[in-house]
Image (tube, helix red, strand yellow):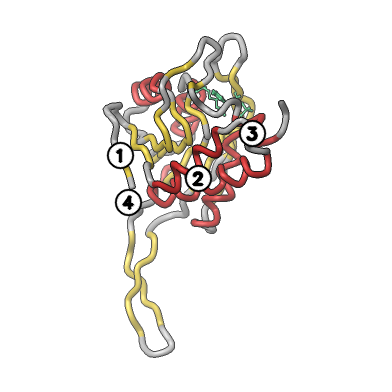
Amino acid sequence: MLTTPALLGLTVVSHPLVQHKLAILRDQATPKKIFKELVDEIAMLMAYEATADLALEPAEVITPLETTTGQRVAGKKLTLVPILRAGLGMVEGILKLVPSARVGHIGLYRDHDTLEPVDYYFKVPGDAAEREFFLLDPMLATGGSAASAVASLKRAGAQRIKFLCLVAAPEGVKRLHAAHPDVPIFAASLDRELNANGYILPGLGDAGDRLFGTR
Ligand code: PRP
Ligand code: URA
């Protein structure tokens, strides 16, 4: 179940189960273990929607009774790329749905003072031009991290990229779409705004800290 708010490039996964789980995720009383499980489950449900346009190709299948033609996903394996650290929380859930997906990694953190991304790691499969990428990060705040990660993927040759996040701020959606209009953005929620420290309101706090208990 998808809705398209007025912001260009954004699709909100408005499925009732996603919205129910997101409400629990936002709750400051939700413990780390449940928080991690919910990020996993929401990511899986979002990936179900974001994979709806995957290309298929016919494939012969021999059933116990006869030969028939089934449909298989065409092309190279889908590649998941979490933005470290918090994006890691979304990987396992999507792998339950697409177990054959490859996994790359982009290491980025947001400088506390400037709010601009600082990158420290990059590794994706070599044949990037032939693959479809799902770039993963629970939070799209100023959009600096996402825009920088997409630019890194493109430098490596990637041509088909979707960005999946749980909570997006309008500021982040606008910045990412302005920098990379070819990258569709999927979110479980479009929140109201950023506060003066670049945190999303109402948001869910610091996703990395809540996932890994580093607060
Ligand atoms: C958070 C989040 C995004 C980024 C979003 O990561 O996971 O990567 O901030 O902010 P932006 O849209 O303003 O760039 P953080 O830098 O806190 O690193 P972490 O995942 O290692 O905690
Ligand atoms: N990063 C987070 O983890 N949370 C926010 O609200 C903004 C950036």
Q: Which residue is mark 4?
A: 53
- Residue 40 percent location from the top left of the image: 56, 46
Query: Tag 3, which secondary structure?
Result: loop
Q: Amino acid at mark 3?
A: Ala
Between marks 3 and 2 in the image, the one whose residue lies nearer the viewer? 3
Percent x, y of residue 70: 35, 72
Some atom of ligand 1 lies within 8 Å of the CB belonging to the residue at label 4 = no
Residue at mark 2: 43
Mark 3 sits on what residue? 29
Contact (Cβ within 8 Å) of mark 2 with mark 4:
no
Ligand 2 placement by image quarter = top right
- Mark 2 lies within 8 Å of ligand 1 (Cβ measured): no
According to the picture, the residue beneath numbered tag 1 turns out to be 3
Q: Residue at x 48, y 36 (%)?
A: 166
Whichever of labels 4 and 1 marks the residue nearer the N terminus, that label is: 1
Between the C-alphas of marks 2 and 4, the distance is 17 Å
The residue under the point 43% across, 88% down is: 64
Label 3, residues with CA under 10 Å away: few <14, some 14-19, many ≥20: few
Look at label 4 and name its amino acid.
Answer: Asp
Residue type at numbered disc 1: Thr
